[in-house]
Amino acid sequence: MKIQDVQFSKTEWSKITPVEYKGEKGTSFWRSFEDGNIRVRLVEYSPGFSSDHWCSRGHILLVLEGELVIKLKDGREFTLTSETSFQVSDDDSNPHLAYTIKGAKVFIVD
């Protein structure tokens, strides 16, 4: 990852209004910061949330609270709990989606 055209800045996540995004099931609430070529998000997934699409975008995702399952299109699944992350590059060889039974709060850089 090469971060470009991003000036130093401090983000006070509690002051960013969350935006609601519906999944196939459940809801997620995103607090987002975008600058240069990056997007940084603090996302809260409701219990029972599941993504409504396969994603091929690269991410670094860290679970802060709860439990999130990442499913790859090839059928593999990885359960992430607090202080667990996953990293994946921008490409079509690792499409993934997320779901949670219990709910989760995550920090994402992409």
Image (spheres, rainbow, N blue to C red):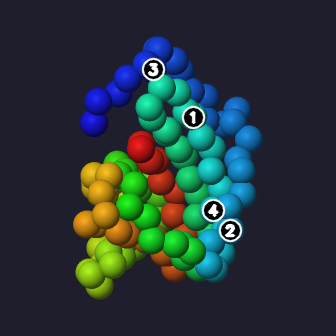
Quarter of the figure with the N terminus: top left
Question: Which residue sits at x=54%, y=46%?
Answer: 42
Mark 3 = which residue? 6
Q: CA distance from mark 1 to mark 3?
A: 11 Å
* Disc nearer the start of the sequence (2/4): 2
Q: Are marks 2 and 4 in contact (CB under 8 Å)?
A: no
Mark 4 = which residue? 28
Question: x and y percent of residue 56 in the render?
Answer: 38, 61
Q: Amino acid at mark 3?
A: Val
Q: Amino acid at mark 1?
A: Phe
Quarter of the figure with the C terminus: top left
Mark 2 = which residue? 22
Secondary element under disc 1, as helix, strand or loop, is strand
Secondary element under disc 2, as helix, strand or loop, is strand
Q: CA distance from mark 2 to mark 4?
A: 6 Å
Of residue 57 and residue 48, the one placed in the foreground of this image is 57
Q: Amino acid at mark 2?
A: Lys
Secondary element under disc 3, as helix, strand or loop, is loop
Q: CA distance from mark 4 to mark 3?
A: 26 Å
* Disc nearer the start of the sequence (4/3): 3
Residue furthest to the bottom: 75
Q: Amino acid at mark 4?
A: Ser
Mark 1 = which residue? 33
Of residue 81 and residue 19, the one placed in the foreground of this image is 19
